[in-house]
Image (cartoon, rainbow, N blue to C red):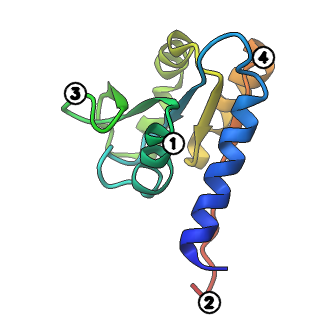
Amino acid sequence: MTARSNTLSHTARLVAAASAVATTRPLTICHFTVAHTQLKSRSFHRELLPLAAAGVNIRYIAPMDSCAPRNGVHFVPLPRRRSRLARVLTAIGLLRLLLRQEASLYFFQDPELLPTAFALKLLFRKRVVYDAYRISPLS
């Protein structure tokens, strides 16, 4: 399977998961990260842009300076944090920001955000996807 078809099938799974809950309101996916900027992320180019082109409402919460929409993706800025510990400690403010997005599906990749994601899922009953792509010696 090629990298392109892998990305498309992953994107299709995200849309299917979110569509299952988006029966009465428009589909909104909120991707959140504390480690990547909006334009340097694999998720932005390979997952979020195709979803936005397909008509899905996309909110992208990330450390950034600019928050003007781009190609259908709406950016929500986070302050930049240098250390992993500082990124973990921003969890409470991030949780409030995530809840304001009222998304159908919340999507993330940073392991330090697992406690925040568990809070979204267990305390607030939100649908959450953890994209744990792996790095192997063969890649």
Q: How far apart in space, not on screen, are marks 4 and 2 (Cα)?
A: 38 Å
Which mark is first along the chain, 3 or 2? 3
Residue drawn at 61 percent across, 69 percent down: 5
Residue in the foreground of this view, choosing between 65 and 69: 69
Q: How far apart in space, not on screen, are marks 1 and 4 (Cα)?
A: 23 Å
Residue drawn at 41 percent across, 49 percent down: 44
Indicate the position of residue 82 as horizontal and vertical percent values: 32, 45
Compared to residue 84, the image places residue 132 above or below, namely below
Q: How far apart in space, not on screen, are marks 2 and 3 (Cα)?
A: 38 Å
| Image quadrant containing the C terminus | bottom right
Which mark is first along the chain, 3 or 1? 1
Compared to residue 136, the image places residue 116 above or below, namely above
Q: How far apart in space, not on screen, are marks 3 and 4 (Cα)?
A: 30 Å
Q: Secondary structure at mark 3?
A: loop
Q: Which residue is mark 1?
A: 51
Q: How far apart in space, not on screen, are marks 1 and 3 (Cα)?
A: 18 Å
Q: Which residue is mark 3?
A: 68
| Image quadrant containing the N terminus | bottom right
Q: Which residue is mark 4?
A: 125
